[in-house]
Image: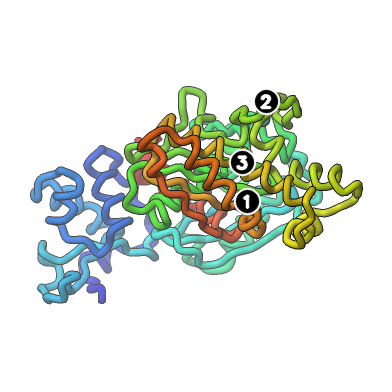
């Protein structure tokens, strides 16, 4: 139960507050966001700040209504409202965030609260992937979502966009997106102008990884990798508590690790990339060749493999082997605690899961192989939620990037 002491009630108007982003504020905010309700003593222990430092840093968050004090601690011992011993929690309804995921054929938008919980969602088909048409569809879905509740109008200033491919988060530029066939599109500027919202553009898998890091399988882990399997293969690396973007923003693109000696040409122009063997398109192409049916669909390929067709089975085995090699490379190179495997291709994951694990175990070097592989189904709206999480991060802890 949360107590709204009078000062918080007065402060919790629609006026949005500009949070401080000094390292102590970022650490306290992130700790309360991911551990709430959490006592000041526990925050001090987790962040290395002094007790007085935590109290001082939390004060403006409380005054602006972004933190609230719960009436009793996790141990159930009641304390007076507003006393420094009360655990701190996030006031989820203090501010709202919009996240939009752009795919090749639709845009998916959500409104989340400050805890990145989805409050409402919308889908809109894309008639064209021409940048202006996609920007119009995003602007329209944002208008629709904000129009659903007055508080979404008044307490929302941030928009997060998640797009597959090479995205420069600092400038909002989509440098290259294979599914949209985009090169150097200033999507952040376009949507900032169209919506009036502060707009952050993030690679879709990195956006998903932020939500997983704060609230999902990656919670409490300093180092993990997220790999998404489906029409493409995406990856994000979280190391020592920070997302690895690399010098050029594209670090972690596991789908383009050259794992094959074969010469298949990838959409990116490279040869032998993981995607040329283990993306849905690659698997379907192999099964088509194997069974001599040029019109075979992924659903039919999955059914054939489940029925024991040797050609279909071999295609999934090869995909599993290639994914296992790529994951072993990641584990050997950076040594994450766990690798989360997700994506729309998970419906067929049972067909290559054993092979992924076998190849991974055989190839990860020494203790790096202790890294656990965790399979996590995530519905499409989770990607949009990830985009909203990226916008929360951009507002409260921009130093993370
Ligand atoms: Zn490639």
Q: Please report the residue visible at 15 percent of the width from the left and 66 percent of the height from the top.
A: 86
The alpha-carbon separation of the residues under discs 1 and 2 comes to 20 Å
Q: Quadrant of the N terminus?
A: bottom left
- The x, y position of residue 132, in whole percent, is 73, 41
**Local crowd at mark 2 within 10 Å, few (<14), some, or many (≥20)?**
few
Task: Left or right? Give the position of 313 relative to 342.
Answer: right
Label annotation for residue 321: 3
Task: Left or right? Give the position of 290 relative to 173.
Answer: right
According to the picture, the residue beneath numbered tag 1 turns out to be 352
Instruction: Look at the numbered disc 3 and give the secondary structure of its residue.
Output: helix
Q: Earlier in the sequence, mark 3 or mark 2?
A: 2
Task: Left or right? Give the position of 49 relative to 369.
Answer: left
Q: Earlier in the sequence, mark 1 or mark 2?
A: 2
Does residue 117 appear in this view? yes
**Local crowd at mark 3 within 10 Å, few (<14), some, or many (≥20)?**
many
Q: Quadrant of residue 24?
A: top left
The alpha-carbon separation of the residues under discs 3 and 1 comes to 8 Å
According to the picture, the residue beneath numbered tag 2 turns out to be 261
């Amino acid at each position: 139960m949360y107590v709204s002491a009078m000062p918080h009630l007065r402060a919790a108007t629609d006026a949005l507050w500009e949070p401080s982003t000094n390292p102590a504020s970022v650490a306290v905010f992130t700790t309360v966001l991911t551990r709430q309700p959490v006592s000041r003593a526990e925050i001090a222990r987790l962040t290395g700040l002094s007790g007085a430092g935590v109290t001082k840093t939390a004060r403006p968050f409380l005054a602006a209504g972004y933190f609230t004090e719960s009436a009793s601690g996790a141990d159930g011992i009641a304390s007076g409202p507003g006393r420094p011993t009360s655990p701190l929690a996030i006031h989820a309804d203090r501010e709202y965030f919009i996240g939009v995921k752009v795919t090749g054929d639709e845009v998916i938008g959500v409104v989340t609260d400050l805890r990145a919980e989805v409050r409402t969602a919308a889908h809109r088909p894309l008639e064209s992937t021409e940048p202006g048409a996609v920007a119009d569809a995003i602007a329209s879905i944002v208008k629709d979502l904000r129009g659903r509740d007055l508080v979404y109008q008044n307490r929302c200033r941030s928009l997060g966009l998640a797009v597959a491919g090479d995205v420069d988060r600092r400038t909002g530029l989509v440098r290259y997106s294979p599914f949209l066939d985009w090169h150097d599109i200033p999507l952040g500027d376009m949507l900032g102008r169209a919506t009036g919202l502060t707009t952050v553009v993030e690679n879709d898998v990195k956006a998903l990884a932020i939500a997983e890091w704060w609230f999902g399988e990656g919670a409490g882990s300093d180092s993990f990798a997220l790999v998404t399997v489906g029409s493409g293969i995406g990856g994000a690396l979280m190391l020592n508590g920070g997302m690895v973007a690399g010098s050029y923003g594209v670090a972690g693109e596991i789908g383009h690790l050259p794992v094959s000696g074969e010469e298949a040409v990838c959409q990116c122009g490279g040869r032998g990339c993981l995607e040329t063997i283990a993306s849905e398109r690659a698997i379907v192409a192999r099964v088509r060749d194997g069974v001599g049916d040029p019109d075979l669909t992924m659903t039919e390929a999955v059914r054939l493999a489940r029925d024991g067709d040797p050609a279909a089975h071999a295609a999934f085995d090869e995909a599993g082997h290639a994914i296992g090699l790529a994951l072993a490379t990641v584990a050997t190179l950076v040594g994450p605690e766990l690798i989360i495997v997700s994506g729309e291709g998970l419906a067929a994951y049972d067909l290559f899961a054993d092979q992924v694990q076998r190849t991974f175990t055989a190839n990860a070097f020494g203790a790096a192989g202790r890294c656990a592989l965790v399979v996590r189904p995530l519905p499409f709206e989770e990607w949009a939620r990830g985009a909203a999480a990226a916008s929360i991060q951009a507002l409260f802890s921009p130093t993370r990037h």
